[in-house]
């Protein structure tokens, strides 16, 4: 965003936030002066006239002044920055999507603000870990949980599924007990060529009595659910779409790669 372009909407939001706190522009000026003195940096200072111009949308404040506004208005820095189009919450996802050439440890200790997201903390009584299901159907309670390394997940546009402990359809590619990310906008079975099993599209399927996560193929009105060769399971056929419906394409997976103690190799962890 051009710092010299008018941004009336952001300025109005700041004005509303200030007035809700019962602060005048002179009050903000005095408080920012205190911050500037403590930090020994005049960049933190907001004069009455300067703040008035911001609220009128004449220009965008710099980083130091955004900091002072965040502290005085008791709002997170990321929220204040978002008023002006800077979405700090997207930073981790952008980091993950861009990537760098060399393998490295991911360090987030320097991130100033801990982001949080709603995650399931309590499941409905009828939920069974043995069965594959959509999280939205089985979660009783969601809570705000810091997600650190998971901030790159797009929770607004995706759905999430749980692979039941008895569902070995794609084992060992996707192990029982895994969580999968689903893009509900990709519901058409792709006919594109793939070179390896990692490139082959995986779909989350809703059946009359449950769910499946598998490779799929359409053949004369039949949806063929194709398991991983090492799973020792048979190909299954369903009338499409009367018996099986595509929820979406699986775009991500979180799973353990080491079995828990006491679990035999090739069996589902309990």
Image (tube, rainbow, N blue to C red):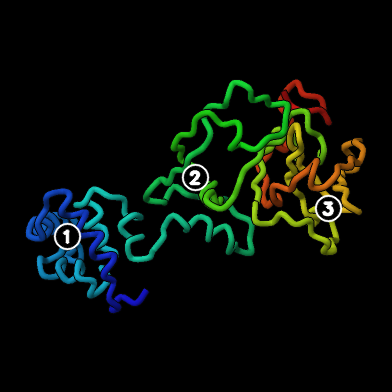
Image location of residue 204, percent across then percent down: 73, 45
Residue 128: quarter of image = top right
Q: Earlier in the sequence, mark 2 or mark 3?
A: 2
Residue 42: quarter of image = bottom left
Quadrant holding the C terminus: top right
Q: Nearer the viewer, residue 131 or 81?
A: 131
Q: Is residue 173 left or right of residue 66?
A: right
Numbered label attached to residue 148: 2
Q: Of circles 1 and 2, which is in front?
A: 2
Q: Which residue is mark 1?
A: 40
The Cα–Cα distance between marks 1 and 2, rounded to whole angstroms, is: 32 Å
Image location of residue 10, percent across then percent down: 28, 64
Q: For numbered disc 1, what is the local secondary structure?
A: loop
Q: Which residue is mark 3?
A: 197
Image location of residue 53, percent across then percent down: 17, 71
Q: Of circles 2 and 3, which is in front?
A: 3
Q: Is residue 127 above or below residue 251?
A: above
Q: Residue at x 71, y 36 (%)?
A: 163
Q: Is residue 112 left or right of residue 235?
A: left
């Amino acid at each position: 965003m051009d710092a010299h372009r008018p941004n009336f909407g952001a300025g109005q939001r700041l004005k509303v936030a200030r007035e809700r706190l019962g602060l005048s522009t002179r009050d903000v000026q005095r408080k920012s002066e205190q911050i500037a003195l403590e930090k020994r940096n005049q960049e933190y200072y907001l004069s009455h006239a300067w703040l008035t111009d911001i609220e009128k949308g004449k220009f965008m404040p710099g980083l130091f002044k955004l900091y002072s506004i965040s502290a005085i208005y008791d709002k997170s820095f990321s929220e204040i920055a978002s008023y002006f189009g800077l979405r700090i919450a997207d930073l981790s996802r952008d980091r993950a999507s861009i990537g760098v050439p060399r393998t490295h440890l991911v360090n987030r200790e320097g991130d100033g603000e801990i982001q949080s997201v709603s995650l399931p903390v309590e499941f409905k009584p009828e939920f069974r870990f043995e069965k594959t299901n959509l999280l939205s159907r089985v979660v009783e309670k969601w809570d705000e949980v810091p997600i650190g390394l998971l901030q790159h997940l797009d929770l607004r546009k995706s759905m999430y599924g749980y692979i039941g402990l008895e569902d070995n359809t794609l084992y060992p590619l996707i192990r029982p007990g895994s969580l999968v990310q689903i893009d509900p906008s990709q519901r058409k079975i792709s006919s594109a060529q793939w070179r390896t099993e990692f490139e082959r599209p995986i779909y989350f399927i809703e059946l009359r009595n449950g769910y499946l996560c598998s490779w799929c193929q359409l053949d004369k009105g039949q949806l063929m659910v194709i398991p991983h060769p090492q799973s020792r399971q048979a190909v299954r056929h369903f009338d499409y779409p009367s018996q099986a419906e595509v929820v979406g394409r699986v775009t991500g997976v979180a799973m353990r790669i080491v079995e828990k103690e006491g679990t035999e190799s090739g069996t589902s962890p309990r």
